[in-house]
Amino acid sequence: MDIVPAPMDQPSLVDKPIATVLVVDDTPDNLALMGSLLKAHYRVKVANSGEKALKIAHGDMPPDLVLLDIMMPDMDGYEVCRQLKAHAATRDIPVIFLTARSNTEDEHRGLEIGAVDYITKPISPPILRARVQTHLSLKATADFLRDKSAYLEREVALRTLEVRAIQNVTIMAMASLAETRDNETGNHIRRTQLYVRTLAEKLRYHPRFVDALNNDRTIDMLYKSAPLHDIGKIGIPDSILLKPGKLTVEEFEIMKTHTTLGRDAIEEAERRLGTKVEFLQTAKEIAYSHQEKWDGSGYPEGLVGDAIPVSARLMAVADVYDALISRRVYKPAFTHEQACAIVSKGRGTHFDPDIVDAFMELTEDFRGIAQRYADD
């Protein structure tokens, strides 16, 4: 390696921490000379072959920069560079070729395979050190930005998990308020969650529902929001909510207000926050419209067919099935078969026909959920 002697220049600005430079050359004199030129400014490691260079680069303390001769036996510098760039652990280490080859084709080839610079012989020490310092500074900046980006990604992921946890806790806390008013609901909340998700997954590619359900986030929101379908019952008097017999016409009118009370309670929570909350939109739909019927005979608005939100149509089937198989103060529990027959009979009148068809294909799944989360 031919190097033009020159006085030592000022120390590198890269002082803390001290950067490590790996010099790769098959000639001992060249290794010694390069080491003497750089050791005042950097920690210098040397390798007299491509194999040893790769071993050092993949070691516990990889270099910050590689000065690489091209013409070496067994494995030339181009191949060493290719292998460094092929591995995630070493691809960001800058490589500077030092070589007597000075034609444009060789330089283009070196840069094309990933080198950051190409210094031809004879080499001026000040120019060499300036370029080493420049590329170490660029690497330090790139490493900082990469670490910062990774840190921000971790922070975003952490904050996302926290937000989801807050959503889950908020929903379950609100749902539990309604559950405490009715001592016979038991695992109704958990079961209806699972029923709704099971139906949504079944229908996600159905032509009528693909736009509404073919999205994991949407189905997750349905699952999380289902427990709030009866949140409005917290505003219903105990004398009506817990009445063991049939409700009078006047009492039933009061009971029907739980849909509006539920929606309004969620909207009030949004108002206090001062903004619309995305994950509560589905909850409002379910709370307000799950008692609507396909033929328009439901409440509170008497909506017909597709005017009823999909979320509420799914909830209607899940809620009725579970109410039928559960013991209540006003009735005994029906069998699974009886409940399925009643839901089937409501196809096209009480329920969306396609949702009932999906339900009938999933009856054993519903039975399994009911058994797994049976009330004590």
Image: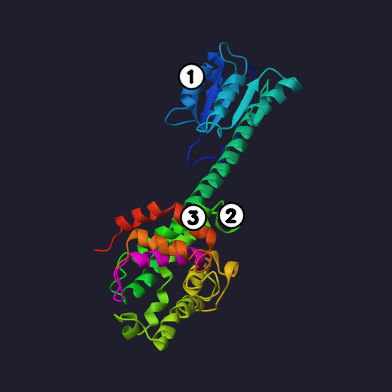
> Is residue 290 in the magenta section?
no
Amino acid type at image mark 1: Lys
Region in magenta: 311-332
Q: CA distance from mark 3 to mark 2?
A: 14 Å
Judging by the rendered image, the residue that carries numbered circle 2 is 210
Check disc 2 and report its element: helix, strand or loop: helix
Q: Is residue 326 magenta?
A: yes
* First-in-chain label (3 vs 2): 2
Mark number, residue 52: 1
> Residue sitting at 50 percent across and 31 percent down?
63
Q: Where 28 sits versus 245, above or below? A: above
Asked where in the image residue 100 lies, by quadrant, the reply is top right
Residue 141: percent from the left, percent from the top?
A: 57, 44
Circles 3 and 2: CB atoms closer than 8 Å: no
Q: Is residue 337 visible?
A: yes
Residue at 33% x, 64% y: name it.
Answer: 325
10 Å crowding of disc 1: few (<14), some (14-19), many (20+): few
Residue 166 in view in this figure: no
Q: Does 320 appear above or below 76?
A: below
> Mark 3 — residue?
358
| Image vertical order of residue 104 relative to residue 346, above or below | above
Disc number at residue 274?
none
What amino acid is labelled 3 in the image?
A: Ala
Q: Quarter holding the N terminus?
A: top right
